[in-house]
Image (spheres, grey):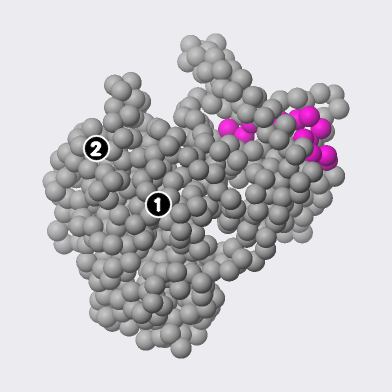
């Protein structure tokens, strides 16, 4: 039997998954990444240590699947986007890798915003800026570490570095180029964006761009000896993680939509062209098949839920973890609308990226009174993350007709039904949890004719585990609560602005 290997290099975890031709994960292994913070606001990794973790999970996943390196016919790699993984002429890391949560360039971004440069960058790239995107980091390095520029041969993203370790070949793909950010219409690097970010010195160090599903190299003898893979096994270029997750749940065609319920909720829809609406907000990534992925993220996703449980407590399991089944029972006992409580879930300290951009926006509970108890607040948090998801999708140029939920929160049938009722559309739960690894494994399988095309691969490997239809009565009730949510978040934006001004002048304790 033939197998494909999907590697998913996440921000906190490296995973390897061996899939059979039906998309079943036969062996899964993961290791946590060590985050290095040599200075406040820095978020780095040791690339050599991350490669060692990758080696370990490949070996373990194959052992769990009881397969040998010869059984694995192709390999795909997904990785978190942005950041900067720099290698010299010998392929040795020049410095620690910098990852997308890094905010050392935040002051540079503020200066660019004040100079009125963000609109031009968005017009070229379809992407809003973040301090941890590649071009911003390269601009910072050019000013603060000019010796790093001189020593660097190639600027890679996370997946590109791991693929280089496997194959010795240097390249990237259009999805990662999107978040450099590049020219989204041309699907190429943008020298103008590099210039605006102060990163022109790096232009000659950007790698060649290959299609995401192209065979970018093969496993070297050295990598084969380390991993147990067979020398010469094809490795495809791969995808950034957001696009890989879309493929892994079968979101291939325009109109397909998914929400990843994670620390940030990535609300994504496949588009036939480079759709930039709403202007200046969110992200736009190049997808296979000539399509695009439009993303409006709620930066305060399950982090808002975690914050609530940390501050207000939660029933515990025997293992000392929150008992989510018990929490759902308590929340379900509260009527729709949480007894009049509305939660604005803007907990993330970086503010809001969509459906509006406001770095100063913060969250709050509205409508509390002497009657308000823990269960009301709890239900309000559940509802708020559904409201925020609908808020993002309604800001897009077209509204999807159904939505796939994935990520940890998608395991909750209670929450999935609430999403269906509040968003007033069917909610589907994908059968495969490791959607990022599956997405690039599908690309790898197509590259070696395991499947004739991506559509066939998706039909063979991606399945709906459950579907939740909106309840007409609940959907009607929630229309009013959703409008109140939007009214409240607009009012609290003004409060957040005044609050930030007071904090800046020292009138309040931070």
Residue at the bottom extreme of this rendering: 1
Provide the secondary structure element on which disc 2 rests.
Answer: helix
From this view, report whether residue 361 is shown above or below residue 304: above
The magenta stretch spans residue 341 = yes
Residue at image location 25% in from the left, 34% down from the top: 197
Specify start and end residues of the magenta stretch as a single range: 334-347
Residue 428 at what x, y percent from top left? 63, 58
Residue at image location 49% in from the left, 48% down from the top: 268
Mark 2 → mark 1, Cα distance in angstroms: 24 Å
Number of marks drawn: 2
Which mark is on residue 160? none
Which mark is on residue 193? 2
Report whether 168 appears left or right of 479: left
Mark 1 is surrounded, within 10 Å at the Cα level, by few (under 14), some (14 to 19) or many (20 or more) other residues, namely some
Residue 84 at what x, y percent from top left? 30, 48
Q: Quadrant of the C terminus?
A: top right
Residue at image location 34% in from the left, 78% down from the top: 448
Residue 277 at what x, y percent from top left? 43, 37
Residue 228 at what x, y percent from top left? 37, 80
Q: Are marks 2 and 1 in contact (CB under 8 Å)?
A: no
**Res 386 quadrant in image:** top right
The magenta stretch spans residue 487 = no
* Residue 37 in sight from this viewpoint: no
* Residue 208 in sight from this viewpoint: yes
Report whether 242 appears left or right of 464: left
Q: Nearer the viewer, residue 476 or 137?
A: 476
From this view, report whether residue 101 is shown above or below residue 11: above
Provide the secondary structure element on which disc 1 rests.
Answer: loop
Q: Earlier in the sequence, mark 2 or mark 1?
A: 2
Residue at image location 68% in from the left, 33% down from the top: 482
Which mark is on residue 272? 1
Mark 2 is surrounded, within 10 Å at the Cα level, by few (under 14), some (14 to 19) or many (20 or more) other residues, namely many
């Amino acid at each position: 039997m033939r197998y494909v290997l999907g590697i998913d290099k996440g921000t906190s975890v490296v995973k390897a998954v061996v899939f059979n031709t039906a998309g079943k994960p036969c062996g899964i292994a993961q290791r946590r990444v060590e985050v290095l913070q040599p200075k406040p606001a820095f978020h780095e990794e040791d690339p050599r240590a991350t490669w060692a973790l990758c080696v370990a999970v490949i070996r373990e996943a194959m052992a769990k699947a009881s397969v040998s390196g010869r059984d694995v016919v192709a390999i795909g790699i997904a990785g978190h986007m942005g950041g900067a993984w720099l290698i010299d002429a010998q392929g040795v890391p020049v410095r620690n890798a910098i990852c997308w949560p890094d905010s050392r360039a935040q002051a540079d971004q503020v200066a660019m915003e004040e100079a009125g440069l963000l609109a031009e960058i968005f017009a070229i790239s379809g992407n809003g800026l973040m301090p941890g995107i590649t071009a911003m980091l390269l601009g910072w390095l050019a000013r603060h570490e000019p010796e790093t520029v001189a020593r660097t041969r190639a600027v890679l993203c996370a997946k590109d570095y791991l693929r280089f370790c496997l194959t010795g070949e240097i390249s990237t793909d259009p999805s990662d180029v999107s978040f450099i950010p590049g020219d989204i219409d041309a699907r190429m690097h943008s020298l103008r964006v590099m210039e605006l970010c102060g990163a022109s010195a790096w232009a000659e160090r950007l790698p060649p761009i290959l299609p995401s599903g192209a065979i970018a190299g093969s496993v070297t003898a050295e990598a084969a000896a380390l991993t147990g893979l067979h020398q010469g096994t094809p490795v495809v270029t791969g995808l950034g993680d957001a696009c890989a997750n879309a493929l892994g749940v079968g979101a291939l065609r325009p109109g397909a939509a998914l929400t990843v319920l994670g620390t940030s909720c990535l609300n994504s829809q496949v588009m036939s062209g480079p759709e930039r609406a709403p202007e200046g907000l969110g992200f736009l990534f190049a997808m296979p098949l000539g399509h695009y992925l439009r993303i409006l993220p709620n930066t305060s996703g399950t982090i808002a839920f975690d914050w609530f449980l940390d501050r207000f407590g939660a029933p515990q399991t025997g293992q000392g973890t929150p008992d989510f089944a018990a929490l759902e029972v308590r929340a379900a006992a509260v009527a729709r609308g949480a007894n009049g409580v509305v939660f604005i879930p803007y907990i993330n300290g970086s503010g809001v990226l969509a459906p509006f951009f406001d770095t100063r926006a913060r969250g709050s509970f509205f409508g509390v009174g002497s009657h308000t108890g823990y269960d009301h607040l709890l239900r309000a948090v559940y509802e708020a993350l559904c409201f925020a998801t609908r808020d993002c999708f309604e800001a897009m140029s077209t509204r999807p007709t159904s939505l796939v939920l994935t990520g940890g929160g998608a395991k909750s049938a209670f929450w999935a039904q609430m999403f269906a009722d509040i968003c007033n559309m069917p909610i589907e739960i994908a059968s495969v949890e490791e959607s990022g690894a599956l997405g690039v494994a599908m690309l790898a399988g197509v590259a070696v004719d395991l499947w004739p095309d991506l559509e066939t691969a998706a039909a063979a490997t991606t399945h709906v585990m459950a579907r939740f239809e909106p309840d007409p009565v609940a959907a009607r009730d929630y229309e009013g609560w959703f409008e109140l949510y939007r009214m409240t978040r607009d009012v609290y934006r003004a409060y957040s602005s005044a609050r930030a001004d007071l904090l800046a002048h020292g009138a309040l304790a931070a």
